[in-house]
Image (cartoon, rainbow, N blue to C red):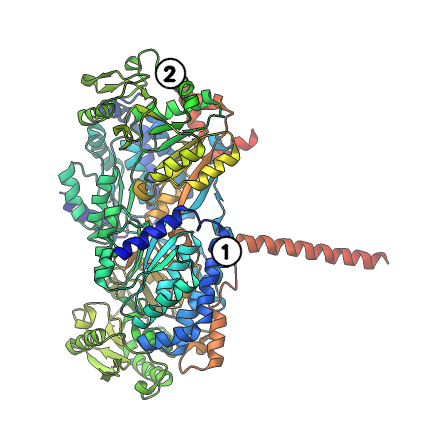
């Protein structure tokens, strides 16, 4: 545990030396990280396959490419992100230099997750590097192969004084959190998030929490059933359902459900063939513990399995499963499923669906499938969620222009693209005044008078009319 | 009682009342009327709380509060509108934007030094963002707190914005409840407790804390003006300002001139006996009076030093050659004591500042642009004013907040609105164009994979200002060349 302390100290000295501040250093490190990914693509794919039986296609588009895109985006935009942002002024400050500087926070801690072990660990790291910080990366021990790979590769490509990997489980993380960081970025569960936030409050460390929740998927009666079914199946069973933004459960009317089921069956057959277990495009559950948890939920459920349901413990395999006749109090509705089981609950109207969604915690993502734009707008306006996507699933998080994060129980803060840069930066408001115009300053000095007060009100006023008068002057 | 207020506020929020912009504008306008109509009562309450002069109140509190409300009313529609973002090939025909949304019920815990500004400016942002808010003013500014509790329900929606008064126990009770955001202004010690309490519900917080804000005076600057500006900032509100210059750093060669500059200014501002000046405030209560007085132990003031416990009066006081290890330099002074610590040069000053906790504000008095830039580059702080003090607070376009021990989160103007909103990422697609989507479905092959990789590379459509300017320039140049070509052809 002393070793961890030393690592933090080493990074802190490096940060203090100012080495991470210049644009050139940050860009070089980002390019190094890019090389890390590109040079070792096959090893990364192998590690992902070992941890999650991740199909190559999924590994490439949802892990490797996401990190590469993020890196290119950061490298291309770093210069403009680092520029001071000049702000609008009032009359009293018209001659001053007023701007916002983005400054690094210091030594940050990034705690990754196991379901997308590359992306969820490295995407925040990109933001941290771009913002000029030193970073300690703590990958999830559950995705052990990726943890080992990162522990080997990061010191090889990245400046070892500035970026370090710390491995281990819950105990090691607890000790690590006793150290003081300038920001903690955590992806994972609400339970662990609470203890991280408590540890952070001791040092007044700001945090970003990317948590989860049950992402509802509302399917309207007026919908292109085949397309909706395909997109839903794709989003749900991607990574065997182990995505924080996977549609967790479906809400629709009975009639829609009856029309949906054959469409789902067809899409499942088209995607994963009639024998999903033999299909190379379907992933596996990460660990025995998670497999058991999912099977237990399915076992306790009072719903009826209409598609799938097969499983194999040795392979940690669960077939893409659809369950109907699920009630609100069902076992499958107790917690985030995080697996290839899709419950369908029935509601008889959009309003009922909205009420149902609002009875629960704010989710990380919310999905609506409908041909009717007013239905989409209604659901959007009457609910809240981290992100929202209509007529598709998951893809909203591939856009670096959109902030990716939760709200309420699904998280605090966001990242991706320049949002990641902002998350790991301090926005310092700066006002550079001159020595002249001391006469105007005397308005504010004691002894106070009514007249001075009047003038002062006018010069600092936020009103548009004051600004217009200034241009006349 | 706290639980009831929260329950009513939450129900009122869930009813959807705060969503329409008209409602929020109406509430903001009502708040504006309250400040305008009742400013005499507010000034009286402040006089009773802290002996604030009748001019200091609008100057230090009400002007900025009024400006915030005016700005929010003028800009609300713009702030609350969806904000489009750049797309990639896959989403080229979709609507992609960020929709700001209210969080729910916000808890605002105010402070006693500027009880109206510090409690109500966050409320302006909370209302503008469409939230409900429980307002908990500081019990130490008793008269202001009671006045606010009596006044606010008469102007604002009583269910959505209740005022809850009380001390430590009531605040602790409140913090046990679940809010959607907690906005706290006060000390770092209590800030930690607030964050810890909020952590149980995973509630995000904004903490506007304090610290020792350094004030560096370079030997080559207009000392007379510098001293005047520093004196104003330090002794306004009797030094009880989170962004007051806490201590001075300067070279020994100018120390005496600095003291002289301050002495002359004090005479101009408060006369021979500041105790008799109507413009000089008092310490908030006996406990803080004792605390500030005890900081001076072992030091003889070179200016001031007088006090009167019965009035909680401490004269504007300056102390020379203060040791970095003295009590004065261990905690935020938050009173009218101004220690001068000598440093050998600017590098020494930078080192001194960087060794300590990140302050809420940093002040640099210097005429050399390069030196100023160096100091900005080699230090950090919540905010900075160069060649003056505190004024960065008054510009609403600058984000105001701390870093490290001085706080987290920021506010003022649009920043308050953003801080108390959820920026919801929205992608609105249609079910058409399914043929484009086919490439991403299993079963997978190399050709499909390549197509999808291309579609996800972004940005393909870049709406950034830089590209726009480039596009316009290139179009103009191309057009110019085309016209030139035409002219050449026609001439021939």
Q: Residue A413: x and y, percent?
A: 33, 54
Q: Which residue is label 2 attached to?
A: B263
Q: Residues within 10 Å of mark 1 (few under 14, many from 20)?
A: some
Q: Residue B46's x, y, as percent?
A: 26, 25
In this picture, is B95 found above or below A58?
A: above
Q: How many marks?
A: 2
Measured as percent of width and height from the top left, residue B98 is found at 40, 56
Q: Is residue B110 left or right of residue B430?
A: left
Label 2 environment density (alpha carbons within 10 Å; few <14, some 14–19, many ≥20)? many
Residue A37 position by quadrant: bottom left
Chain to which the residue tagged by mark 2 belongs: B
The answer, for residue A435, to whether it is visible in the render is yes
Helix, strand or loop for disc 2: helix
Taking the spot 33% from the left edge, 69% from the top edge, the residue there is A148
**Mark 1: secondary structure:** helix
Q: Could you say where residue B173 lies in the image, as x and y percent from the top left?
A: 14, 44
Q: Which mark is residue A77?
A: 1
How far apart in space, not on screen, are marks 1 and 2 (Cα)?
Answer: 51 Å
């Amino acid at each position: 545990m002393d070793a961890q302390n030393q690592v933090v100290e080493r990074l802190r000295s490096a940060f203090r030396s100012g080495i991470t501040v210049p644009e050139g250093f940050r860009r070089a490190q980002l390019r190094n990280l890019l090389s890390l990914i590109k040079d070792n693509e096959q090893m990364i794919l192998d590690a992902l396959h070992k941890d999650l039986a991740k199909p190559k296609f999924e590994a490439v588009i949802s892990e490797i490419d996401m990190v590469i895109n993020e890196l290119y985006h950061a490298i291309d935009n770093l210069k403009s992100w680092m520029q001071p942002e000049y702000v609008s002024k009032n009359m009293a400050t018209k001659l001053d230099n007023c701007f916002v500087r983005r400054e690094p926070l210091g030594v940050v801690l990034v705690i990754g997750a196991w379901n997308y072990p590359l992306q969820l660990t490295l995407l925040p790291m990109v933001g941290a590097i771009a913002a000029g910080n030193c970073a300690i990366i703590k990958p999830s021990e559950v995705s052990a192969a990726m943890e080992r790979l990162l522990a080997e590769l990061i010191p090889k490509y990245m400046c070892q004084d500035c970026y370090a990997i710390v491995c281990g489980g819950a105990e090691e993380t607890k000790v690590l959190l006793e150290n003081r960081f300038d920001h903690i970025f955590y992806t994972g569960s609400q339970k662990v998030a609470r203890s991280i936030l408590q540890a952070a409050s001791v040092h007044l460390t700001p945090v970003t929490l990317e948590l989860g929740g049950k992402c509802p998927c509302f399917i309207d009666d007026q919908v292109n059933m085949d397309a909706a079914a395909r997109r839903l199946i794709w989003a749900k069973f991607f990574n065997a359902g182990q995505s924080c933004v996977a549609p967790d459960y479906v809400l629709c009317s009975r009639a829609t459900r009856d029309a949906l089921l054959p469409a789902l069956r067809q899409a499942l057959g088209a995607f994963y063939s009639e024998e999903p277990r033999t299909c190379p495009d379907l992933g596996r559950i990460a660990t025995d513990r998670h497999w058991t948890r999912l099977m237990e939920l399915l076992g306790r459920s009072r719903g009826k399995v209409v598609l799938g349901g097969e499983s194999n413990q040795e392979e940690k395999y669960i077939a893409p499963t659809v369950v109907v006749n699920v009630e609100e109090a069902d076992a499958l509705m107790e917690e985030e499923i995080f697996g290839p089981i899709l419950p369908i609950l029935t509601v008889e109207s959009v309003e009922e669906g909205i009420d149902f969604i609002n009875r629960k915690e704010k989710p990380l993502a919310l999905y609506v499938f409908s041909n009717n734009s007013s239905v989409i707008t209604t659901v959007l306006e009457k609910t809240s969620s981290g992100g929202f996507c209509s007529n598709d699933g998951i893809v909203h998080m591939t856009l670096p222009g959109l902030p990716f994060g939760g709200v309420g129980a699904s998280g605090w803060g966001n990242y991706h693209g320049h949002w990641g840069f902002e998350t790991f930066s301090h926005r310092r408001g700066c006002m550079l005044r001159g020595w002249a115009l001391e006469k105007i300053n005397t308005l504010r000095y004691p002894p106070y008078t009514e007249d001075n007060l009047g003038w002062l009100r006018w010069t600092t006023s936020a009103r548009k009319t004051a600004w217009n008068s200034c241009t006349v002057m | 009682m706290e639980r009831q207020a929260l329950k009513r506020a939450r129900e009122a929020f869930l009813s959807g009342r705060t969503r329409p912009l008209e409602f929020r504008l109406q509430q903001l306008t009502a708040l504006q009327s309250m400040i305008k109509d009742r400013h005499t009562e507010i000034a009286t309450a402040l006089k009773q709380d802290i002996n604030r002069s009748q001019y200091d109140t609008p100057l230090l509190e009400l002007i900025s509060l009024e400006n915030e409300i005016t700005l929010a009313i003028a800009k609300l529609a713009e702030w609350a509108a969806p904000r489009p973002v750049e797309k990639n090939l896959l989403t080229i025909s979709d609507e992609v934007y960020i929709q700001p949304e209210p969080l729910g019920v916000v808890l605002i815990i105010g402070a006693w030094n500027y009880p109206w500004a510090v409690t109500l400016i966050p409320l302006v942002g909370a209302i503008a963002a469409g939230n409900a808010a429980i307002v908990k003013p500081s019990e130490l500014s008793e008269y202001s707190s009671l006045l606010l509790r009596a006044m606010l329900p008469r102007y604002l929606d009583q269910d959505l914005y209740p005022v809850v008064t009380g001390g430590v126990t009531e605040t602790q009770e409140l913090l046990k409840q679940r809010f959607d955001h907690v906005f706290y202004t006060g000390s770092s010690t209590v800030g930690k407790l607030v964050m810890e309490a909020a952590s149980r519900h995973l509630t995000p917080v904004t903490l506007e804390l304090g610290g020792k804000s350094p004030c560096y005076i370079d030997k080559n600057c207009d000392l007379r003006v510098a001293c005047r500006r520093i004196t104003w900032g330090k002794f306004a509100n009797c030094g009880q300002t989170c962004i007051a210059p806490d201590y001075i750093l300067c070279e020994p060669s100018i120390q005496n001139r600095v003291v002289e500059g301050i002495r002359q200014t004090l005479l101009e501002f408060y006369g021979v006996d500041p105790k008799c000046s109507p413009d000089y405030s008092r310490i908030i209560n006996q406990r803080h009076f004792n605390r500030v007085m005890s900081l001076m132990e072992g030091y003889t003031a070179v200016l001031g030093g007088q006090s009167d416990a019965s009035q909680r009066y401490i004269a504007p006081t300056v102390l020379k050659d203060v040791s970095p290890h003295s009590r004065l330099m261990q905690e935020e002074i938050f009173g009218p004591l101004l220690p001068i610590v000598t440093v050998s040069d600017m590098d020494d000053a930078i080192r001194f500042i960087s060794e300590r906790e990140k302050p809420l504000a940093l002040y640099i008095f210097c005429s050399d642009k390069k030196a100023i830039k160096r100091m900005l580059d080699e230090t950090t702080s919540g905010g900075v004013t160069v060649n003056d003090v505190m004024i960065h607070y008054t510009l609403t376009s600058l984000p105001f907040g701390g870093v490290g021990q001085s706080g987290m989160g920021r506010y003022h103007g649009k920043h308050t609105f953003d801080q108390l909103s959820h920026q919801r990422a929205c992608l609105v697609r249609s079910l058409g164009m399914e043929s484009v989507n086919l490439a991403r479905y299993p079963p997978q092959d190399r050709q499909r994979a390549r197509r999808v990789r291309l579609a996800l590379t972004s940005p393909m459509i870049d709406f950034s200002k830089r590209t726009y300017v480039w596009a316009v320039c290139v179009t103009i140049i191309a057009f110019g060349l085309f016209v030139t070509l035409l002219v050449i052809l026609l001439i021939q």
